[in-house]
Amino acid sequence: MNLLLQGEDNVTLETAEKIAKLSGGTEEYWLSLQKAYDEKKALLKI
């Protein structure tokens, strides 16, 4: 979890399921945050 919070790891389906279970959110929400992060990161490398 520390690596995830430090931006050194990605949210996987397994991670999203665990976070959703703890937070009451959905897996889709956490996966969409990862996707948005990846897209922004890719744009910054251009």
Image: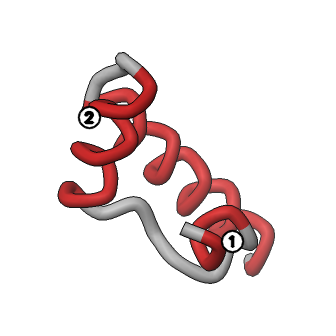
- Toward which corner of the image does residue 26 lie, by quadrant? top left
Residue at image position (23%, 44%) is 17
The residue at 44%/25% (across/down) is: 23
Q: Is residue 35 left or right of residue 17?
A: right
- In the rendered image, which quarter contains the N terminus? bottom right
- In the rendered structure, the answer to whether residue 41 lies left or right of residue 23 reads right
Rendering coords of residue 42 (x, y %): 63, 70
Q: Position of residue 29 (x, y in %)?
A: 38, 28
Between 11 and 19, the one lying in front of the other is 19
Indicate the secondary structure of the residue bearing disc 2: helix
User: At 31% from the left edge and 58% from the top edge, which residue is drawn?
Assistant: 15
- Which kind of residue does numbered mark 1 sit on? Gly
User: Measured from the top left, where is residue 40 in percent x and y?
Assistant: 68, 55
Residue under pointer 2:
27
- Where 5 sits versus 31, above or below? below
Q: Of residues 36 and 4, which is closer to you in this image?
A: 4
The answer to which of marks 1 and 2 sits earlier in the sequence is: 1
Residue picked out by circle 1: 7
Q: Is residue 20 left or right of residue 34?
A: left
CA distance separating discs 1 and 2? 18 Å
Query: Under tag 1, what secondary structure?
Result: loop
Q: Which mark is residue 21?
A: none
- Residue reaching furthest to the right: 44
